[in-house]
Amino acid sequence: MRKVERLFAIGDEIVTKAARNDLYAKVVDSTGNTVGKVTRILGPVKSPYGIVKLRTKEGSNIELFIKE
């Protein structure tokens, strides 16, 4: 698992640094519960950003990880 580096949040979405192969990857909390997924990849090819769609707004306050 790789920790989600939050850049900023918009409602129930978080913008984070991502890899190109992170599209549709599950996002989990520290206990392994799925709390969302990466829905879009955008930005420059060398350093893309991912949009994480959370299932609930509570996920915006907890430590998140991308399940690889």
Image (spheres, helix red, strand yellow):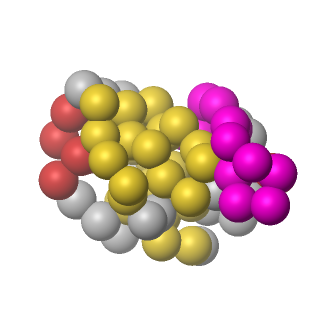
Q: Which residues are magenta?
A: 37-48
Q: Looking at the image, which residue is at 61% across and 48% down?
A: 49
Residue 65, position as x, y percentages in the image = 47, 64
**In this view of the protein, can residue 32 be seen by the observer?**
no
Q: Does residue 6 appear left or right of residue 68 in this picture?
A: left
Q: Does residue 55 appear left or right of residue 40 in this picture?
A: left
Where 24 falls versus 20 (above or below)?
above
Q: Looking at the image, which residue is at 43% across and 65% down?
A: 5
Which residue is nearer to you in this view: 13 or 57? 13
Where 6 falls versus 35 (above or below)?
below
Which residue is nearer to you in this view: 21 or 41? 41
Where 1 falls versus 43 (above or below)?
below
Q: Quadrant of the N terminus?
A: bottom right
Q: Quadrant of the C terminus?
A: bottom right
Q: Does residue 55 appear left or right of residue 44 in this picture?
A: left
In this rendering, the count of numbered labels is 0
**In this view of the protein, can residue 57 be seen by the observer?**
yes
* Quadrant of the rendered image containing residue 39: top right
Magenta stretch holds residue 47: yes
Residue 18, position as x, y percentages in the image = 64, 56
Residue 11, position as x, y percentages in the image = 25, 26
Q: Looking at the image, which residue is at 65% across and 31% down?
A: 40
